Amino acid sequence: MFSLQTTIQSFLFLLIATLSTSIYADKNPSLAHTRITVWQHTIEHPDPIFITILIKALDITRHEYGEYEIVPSKEMEQGRAVQRLAIKYEGVLDVAHFASSLEREKGAIAVKVPLLNGLLGYRVCLINKGDQPKFSNIKNKQAFIDNRLTIGQHQDWPDAHILKSSGLDVRTSYKYSLLFQQLKKQRFDCYLRGINEVTDEYEKYADLNFEIENTLLFHYPFPIFFFVHESDPELAQRITLGLTRLKEKGALSELVKLYHKAQIDKLHLDKRKLIAIDNVILPEDSIQTLTPIPWLPL
């Protein structure tokens, strides 16, 4: 099963990090030991690239900051994880990955090196089998609105506000897994998913008879950052240094390409109609962190 594979991958990443840290500690006993509580969803995310990048960023900064230990947080939805990075919740959560917004950047320290270089801002619809004719003649955002097509999103995700602000009809739920059931029950027409997510989700929920809509591509600027607890600027500096080194070596873009190019190629992005949407809740300097993805066929 996909979920079992993901769990095994996450466990192996953590095991490697723990073992390599222990070896390093034996050779460098004077360096401080940093215990880092990482959002459980970052560790067990269906896309293991996030925990992979975090471990690499911590490994590449050992010389300056010493050894570390990653500890998973309690399971929590995204909205609660965002809250737990605030100063009044010190000791609960140290690091998590989220799509950025002005509000989130005010409540925690944003490490402004995009983890997927904005890939998640390119989105396609997961739809019920047989619903493709609803979308085939849509040429732009206004036509989507005029045809009264609806989009499903999580209430805690920034996407919901971005899409509503652009005039689209958005239906929300409090839980990620429920959105697939609500799509099946036709509570909305399109569950808008990232191009790096949708093929895996399509396969995971094969028994629900969904299909991937094949004519439209939505886009809004949407960087994913690591966010660090307000009380720990040193950890934020360490992760920033690590990510910067990985980016300068080309390792970040290579990881994104390795993990996602094959599945994205199946979506034939160059043949889709692009619907561009402004991200009204993202600071301008965060938008400027995004650069073109050379291998993305647009």
Image (spheres, rainbow, N blue to C red):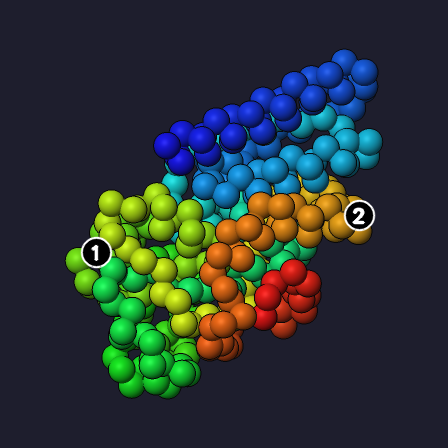
Counting every numbered tag in the picture gives 2
Q: In the picture shown, does residue 242 fall above or below 164?
A: above
Q: Which percent across, then down, holds residue 238?
A: 72, 42
- Residue at horizontal 19 percent and vertical 62 percent from the top: 186
Q: Which percent across, then down, holds residue 232?
A: 64, 42
Assess disc 2: are there few (<14), some (14-19) or many (≥20) residues with their C-alpha within 10 Å of its C-alpha.
few
Q: Which percent across, then down, holds residue 27?
A: 81, 16
**Label 1 element class:** helix
Towards the viewer: 118 or 240: 118
* Gap in angstroms between the C-alphas marked 1 and 2: 44 Å
Q: Label 1, on which residue?
A: 184
Kindly identify which numbered label has been placed on residue 126.
none
Q: Which percent across, then down, holds residue 160?
A: 38, 66
Q: Which quarter of the rendering shows the C terminus?
A: bottom right
Towards the viewer: 123 or 101: 123
**Label 2 element class:** loop
Left or right, 212 with reference to 296: left
Q: Which quarter of the rendering shows the N terminus?
A: top left
